[in-house]
Amino acid sequence: MVKAILEEEELVQSIRRVDKKEEFLSALKEEQFDIVLTDYSLPVFHGLEAIHILKTKYPDLPVIMITGNLADEIAVDVMKKGAWDYVLKENIYRLVPAILNAVENLKIKKERQSALEGLKESETNYRLLAESSPYGIIVHANRSILYHNQVAMRIFKVPDKVKSLVGLKIEDYVHPDFREVLAERIDRLYKGEMLEKEYEIRFLDFEKKELFLEVASSPINYNGQPAAQVIIRDIEERKKMERDLILAKERAEASDRLKSSFLENLSHEIRTPLNGIIGFASLLKLKDLSHEDRDNYVKVIEDSGKHLLTIIDDLIEISRIESGQFELRSERFLLNEIMDDLYLFFNNADFYKNTNVILGLTKGLRDQESVVIGDKARLKQVLFNLLSNAFKFTREGRIDFGYRKPDEDGVLFFVRDSGIGIPEDSKDIIFERFRQVDNSSSREYGGNGLGLSICKGIVNAMHGKIWFDSKVDQGSDFYFRIKLNFLNTAVVSRKLNHSSGKLKYEWKGKNALIAEDESSNFILLKHILERTGIGITHVKSGVEVISKLETGDNFDIILMDIKMPELDGMETIKILRERNIQIPVIAQTAYAMTEDRDKCLKAGCNDYITKPIRSSELLGKMHTFLNNQG
Ligand code: ADP
């Protein structure tokens, strides 16, 4: 009957009939069915068992029970066990609608399932996308957060103990200044409006610190409700980079300006003494010059030359400091001797032509207590630079300098003047190289802006500190504090004679060998030495030095230029020392580098002198060796 109905209605393509459990199971295995119709009780099988098998193994296959007669409670049981429907044989007309209903329902169920699966997949994809995004992503609806990725947590500096932002109110994390603008935008988003591209908004992170974010948001539907998806990017770094870039650009421009103004100054600084040299040298050619004029002109030339030399020395010193090729020397000296030397030098009345200045010196220790080990020349240079500035910028009043009694923090040196002072806004720059309070080329005081940066470089290298106090029109107090290594005993004998150049040198009967390839240099040396009565032999290369000594000529001293053709000075000295020729050698070079000095001494020189040669220095050094020999 059932078969007839189904065929008549053309409801099914095929029908398979079974009445035993094994047949039922193998049929299910062999074929795919759309529906199972079963009797309640069969001779060797049972409808309820069939339902049970289907529910556990084929839950999607609908089953309808067709039965002759069913008590209500059994019907309920059948439905409970999982039948889709039951049809009484007497109401068999219900079979077709029941089957159609079951099939339709199955179809809907399958569709929903696949829709759900699709949804799940797209949600997983969305999350994957969101999690792998380098930007923070937040979805919010009704102004509270529904979803966010991990980057968003990082951007807002969410502490570890907070595991999720879901449920938090957006407004609480917006900078108060931006709340209004943002509220308006959020309203538009919830209404489905697209907003303009990206915009920048300040937020507050979990530490309540300001956060500069770039935001791009769009309206979306999230779980069926209108929501907003927000992509956020931390632009603090970018903003900082922009600021740095602007700063770097400004600095580069400033340094460019500085360099040109430095070159202008330098050119001015070099031209001034050069003018003196060239101008007065040509005056010297004039006939009928009085002795006095000639002496004056020569003095100008000498002074200008010395001035030029200090500029070059400064440049070399600063480049050495800046390139880090700067080594401090260790020698034993009397601190008070440096102070006295400086006092003598600066107290010279015509220095900077400011005769109205009184110079005072304070020494924190007695002479015999002031024995230290350190870099004497560098320490003196710092004080010299500070005193030069003090004299340069003080027309009248007092300049006091000196040092205080050392304590555990080291020695405090000071140079105090009553000069023009330094304006507040220049305080930070004057220790920078090439910087002056007034960088314009028409400055009235001269100088190249290197003095203080050299001071700072030296004091830093000595692990010390340099600073100053100043008031415009009242004066400046410069200080530096360094640690010095004091010796307890006065082992250094004090050389009170500061002007060894004025000694009378008498070396009649002694002989000097001068190795010098440049004739102008030789003429100068000859000129300096002539007055001493020393015998002079001139050679022009290292090779000649060696052959002269081999021929048995006897010399008391050798003055050796380092840069010579064939065999240079350094090699020559090495050869001499290897051959055990111990005549004192004073080397001369044009490079005022400490390393060269050390190289010379290592090669076997007894002393070293840099060009241009100052007669007092040369004679003083020769004196040491010639006198030792008696
Ligand atoms: P400069 O060779 O120009 O003197 P410095 O580096 O020694 O170079 O000094 C830099 C600038 O600092 C000076 O040009 C001057 O403007 C200011 N300065 C330094 N010392 C003093 C001082 N004692 N009184 C007033 N201004 C000073």
Image (tube, rainbow, N blue to C red):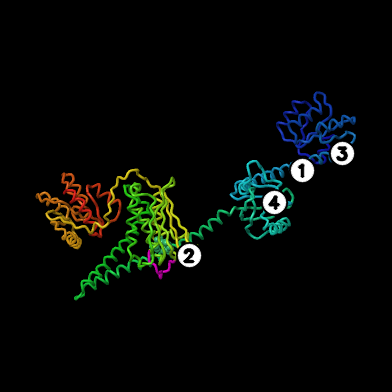
Amino acid type at image mark 2: Val
Amino acid type at image mark 4: Asp
Q: Is residue 255 left or right of residue 212?
A: left
SS label for mark 1 = helix
Label 1: which residue?
108
Q: Earlier in the sequence, mark 3 or mark 1?
A: 3
Q: Classify the position of ligand 1 by quadrant: top left, top right, bottom left or bottom right.
A: bottom left
Amino acid type at image mark 3: Arg
> Is residue 85 placed above or below 288 in the rendered structure?
above
Q: Earlier in the sequence, mark 4 or mark 1?
A: 1
> Is residue 378 placed above or below 71 in the rendered structure?
below
SS label for mark 4 = helix
Which residue appears farthest toward the left when viewing the image?
551
Label 2: which residue?
472
Q: Is residue 343 left or right of residue 612?
A: right
Circle 3 packing at 10 Å, graded few (<14), some (14-19), many (20+), is few
Q: CA distance from mark 3 to mark 2?
A: 113 Å
Q: CA distance from mark 4 to mark 1?
A: 45 Å
Which-is-in-front pick, marks 4 and 3? 4
Q: Earlier in the sequence, mark 2 or mark 1?
A: 1
Label 4: which residue?
172
Which-is-in-front pick, marks 4 and 1? 4
* Tags 2 and 1 touching, CB below 8 Å: no
Residue 329: x %, y % from top left: 33, 48
Which-is-in-front pick, marks 3 and 2? 2
Label 3: which residue?
94
Bounds of the magenta segment: 438-447
Q: CA distance from mark 3 to mark 1?
A: 21 Å
Q: CA distance from mark 4 to mark 3?
A: 63 Å
